[in-house]
Amino acid sequence: MKLISANWKMNMTPSQTKEYLYNFLPLVEDVKDREILLCVPFTSLCIASEMLKDKHVKFGAQNVHYEPKGAFTGEISVSMLKDLGVSYVIVGHSERRWLFGESDEIINKKLIACLGSGIRPILCVGERQDEREAGLTFKVIETQVKLALSSLEDYTDMIDIAYEPIWAIGSGNPATPEDAQKVHRFIKELLESLNKNYKGTTRILYGGSVNTHNASEFMKMPDIDGLLVGGASLDPEAFSQIVKSF
Ligand code: PGA
């Protein structure tokens, strides 16, 4: 099933989350042929867990720590998320990589922690503008995917991947659907080469300046299996249009 996910980033208080869900749920009530996911801030997980109980809209987190518990002030473990009914977590978003110094090694540890718990990670990969201009896009993506999945090659069916070119995030300048398609195809072929038993259940999402006008163009591409939407997901009406755009 296609996966359309919101990434709210550091937006929305618990009260605003409540109001959002109150408005959003009726708009997507009948949309059951695709997965709808809201990746909310940690502080909104509780209210999302209450309001989405028995609903088809799922909720996820935007980050997680890789240790099961202990002296890690300010961090959140996989079991804490699990206990609230979280089904997905974004791992290795470029803002985590570049603003908070998350290395490929840390991202790999986070994926290992998620897979051990049954929470499905959405691994984010993407090249910078200068890397793109230097013709390094495929090399960068290959390195990021391989390092993130190190020792997890046999479990590639248990994750989803978001291709988010960094220059396209929040810039109003998305990749063209054709360029994104090429990278998505490349990632699928890479997964096939890493895992001989790969069943092809990993969805490759596109993210970076997706909005109500361009969503359907991305979803027409054969290897674009969903979207990860930042800014445009903060408005329930706009996000519902994106969810229903294909
Ligand atoms: P954007 O963010 O849709 O605001 O570009 C996407 C993301 O960072 O996941």
Image (cartoon, grey):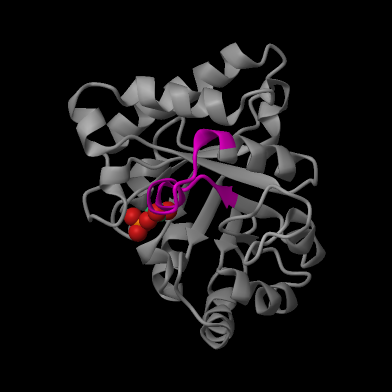
Residue 130 shows in the view: yes
Percent position (x, y) of residue 225?
51, 39
Residue 133 sits in quarter:
top left
Q: Position of residue 31 (x, y in %)?
A: 59, 61
Position of 80 relative to 118 (above/below): below
Quadrant in the picture for the N terminus = top right
The residue that appears at 51% across and 85% down in the rendered structure is 16
Residue 91 forms part of the magenta stretch: yes
Q: Residue furthest front?
A: 71
* Total residue callouts: 0
Q: Quadrant of residue 175?
A: top left
Q: Which stretch did the figure color magenta? A: 90-105
Looking at this view, is 66 or 225 the one in front? 66
134 vs 90, left or right, is left
Tell me the quadrant of ligand 1: bottom left
Image spot of residue 228 (x, y percent)? 46, 51
- Nearest the camera: 172 or 236? 172
Residue at position x 45%, y 23% from top? 143
**Residue at the farthest left position:** 133
Residue drawn at (61%, 75%), measured in percent from left and top?
Answer: 44
Percent coordinates x, y for residue 54 in the rendering: 78, 70
